[in-house]
Image (cartoon, helix red, strand yellow):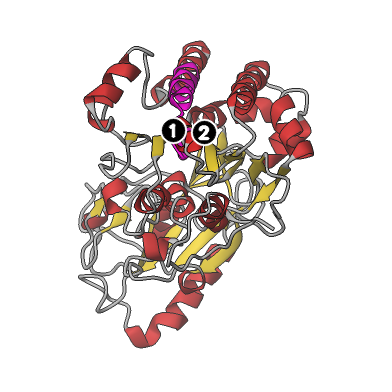
């Protein structure tokens, strides 16, 4: 509800949603001195744990959070998805999301929305008044919904994402500086458009948190070289959240939420190498780098993160597992996965989820047969280039976690008991008094 709406007496609710990608609840609760504003929001409003989805990866999480439905309905399962009836893969973008987005429902109800930097939204929607696509957009020129937005953001030195390649350097100084610059520019852009006051829904995401977590979380967890820089980064983020909260009127609800949690990373687990070692996966020749290179003796393969597919007759182009042997074969694969232990002797698979228990919808043709939720410390990889070992180490020391995402809101009436990502969209619609004829996998948290 903008200024002119209020002058004419329109008192429908407004919502500002700030996404803080990958920020774990434990981090905030363990450092109230760093997160003074989020802590205050929890004390005066609502705050607590928000369960993520299966799999807990940003490319799948944000489409589900912004639609209220599972990947079987959104059609997006991870950073890399498989074409139907093919071994060809692609990186899902906004155009691949099949379910209706929150801001489109708001717009359909005659309200206005400003949407900035949400992952998996490229190309920008033409249905909302103002939009800049986020993660996976090629550049700002293509990500901005119109020339006015593009020119405004150019003036803030706005960038789509942190330069993650800088995080691969042993000296993280330039990476930290780049993360700060990205965070600062994002806040400037958010503040500018918040002050326009012509929106009913403002939906913006800070993605730099995920990047900082990937490359500095291990330092934080072990009081390493960049532990203080890690916490200082979050102190600045929390300050920006506080300034945004202070700029809002009493009729606007602020929601701050993450899409998944985070924990320390110890080992990368190359699951296709594991499948090859165990006789599940083989290739046509020694020079292989994609799913299309598997041969007709392959019984199973994996896609990131921890998704497993049987090479099933009638579903995969060259499927070899008979449908009559599907359950028996899947149980055999589960047994092999459960037996996998890391270099430290711990079991890699904390939980193994059967696809049909979490994926349901019109776009479940490419749903995995199994998804592994790993034990802390084991980051699940699925490359096809042929790693020499199942367990390797890389430049990252932080990884996604299923259990410890978060939600904070200035409204004290939200019930966060057993809350999950699917509840966000119906909650925002409820707070805005927008009625829709739709079925969600979640429900409003508003009491």
Instruction: State left or right for residue 176 relative to residue 446.
Output: left
Q: Give the range drawn in magenta.
A: 183-205
Determine if residue 201 is in view.
yes
Query: Residue 149 versus residue 73: which sits nearer the camera?
Result: 149
Query: Residue 291 versus residue 44: which sits nearer the camera?
Result: 44
Query: Residue 7 versus residue 343: which sits nearer the camera?
Result: 7
Label of residue 274 in the image: none
Indicate yes or no whether the magenta region holds residue 197.
yes
Q: Where is residue 40 in the image (x, y as percent from the top left)?
A: 76, 31
Which residue: 26% across, 22% down? 148
Q: Position of residue 49 (x, y in %)?
A: 68, 49
Toward which corner of the image does residue 185 lie, by quadrant? top left
- Label 2 belongs to which residue? 210
Indicate yes or no whether the magenta region holds residue 354.
no
Q: Give the residue at the far bottom of this rendering.
A: 324
Q: Position of residue 102 (x, y in %)?
A: 43, 51
Which residue: 38% across, 64% down? 73
Instruction: State left or right for residue 323 relative to residue 218.
Output: left
Q: Which quadrant, please, contains the C terminus?
A: bottom right
- Label 1 belongs to which residue? 4
């Amino acid at each position: 509800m903008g200024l002119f709406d209020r002058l004419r007496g329109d008192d429908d609710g407004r919502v500002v949603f700030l996404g803080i990608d990958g920020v774990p609840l434990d981090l905030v609760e363990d450092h109230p001195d760093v997160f003074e504003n989020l802590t205050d929001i929890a004390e005066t409003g609502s705050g607590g744990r928000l369960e993520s989805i299966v799999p807990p990866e940003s490319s799948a999480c944000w489409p589900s959070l912004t639609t209220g439905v599972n990947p079987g309905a959104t059609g997006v399962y991870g950073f890399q998805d498989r074409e139907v009836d093919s071994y060809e893969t692609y990186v899902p973008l906004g155009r691949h999301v099949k379910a209706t987005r929150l801001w489109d429902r708001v717009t359909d109800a005659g309200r206005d929305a400003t949407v900035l930097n949400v992952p998996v939204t490229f190309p920008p929607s033409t249905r909302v008044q103002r939009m800049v696509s986020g993660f996976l957009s090629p550049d700002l020129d293509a990500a901005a919904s119109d020339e006015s937005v593009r020119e405004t953001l150019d003036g803030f030195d706005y960038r789509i994402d942190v330069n993650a390649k800088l995080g691969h350097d042993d000296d993280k100084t330039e990476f930290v500086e780049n993360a700060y610059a990205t965070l600062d520019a994002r806040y400037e852009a958010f503040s500018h458009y918040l002050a326009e006051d012509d929106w009913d829904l403002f939906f913006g995401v800070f993605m730099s948190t995920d990047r900082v977590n990937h490359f500095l979380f291990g330092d934080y967890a072990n009081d390493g070289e960049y532990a203080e820089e890690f916490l200082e980064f979050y102190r600045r983020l929390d300050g920006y959240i506080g300034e945004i909260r202070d700029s809002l009127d009493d009729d606007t609800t602020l929601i701050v939420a993450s899409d998944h949690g985070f924990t320390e990373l110890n080992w990368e687990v190359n699951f296709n190498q594991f499948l090859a070692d165990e006789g599940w996966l083989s290739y046509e020749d020694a020079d292989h780098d994609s799913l299309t290179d598997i041969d007709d003796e392959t019984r199973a393969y994996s896609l990131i993160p921890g998704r497993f597919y049987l090479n099933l007759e009638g579903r995969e182009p060259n499927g070899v597992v008979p449908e009559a042997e599907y359950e028996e074969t899947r149980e055999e694969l589960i047994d092999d996965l459960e037996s996998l232990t890391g270099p430290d002797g711990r079991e890699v698979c904390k939980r193994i989820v059967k696809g049909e228990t979490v994926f349901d919808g019109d776009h479940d043709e490419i749903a995995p047969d199994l998804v592994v939720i790993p034990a802390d410390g084991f980051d699940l990889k699925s490359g096809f280039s042929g790693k020499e070992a199942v367990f390797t180490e890389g430049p990252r020391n932080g990884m996604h976690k299923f259990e410890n995402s978060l939600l904070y809101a200035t409204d004290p009436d939200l019930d966060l008991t057993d809350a999950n990502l699917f509840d966000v969209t119906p909650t925002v619609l409820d707070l805005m008094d927008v009625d829709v004829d739709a079925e969600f996998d979640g429900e409003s948290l508003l009491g």
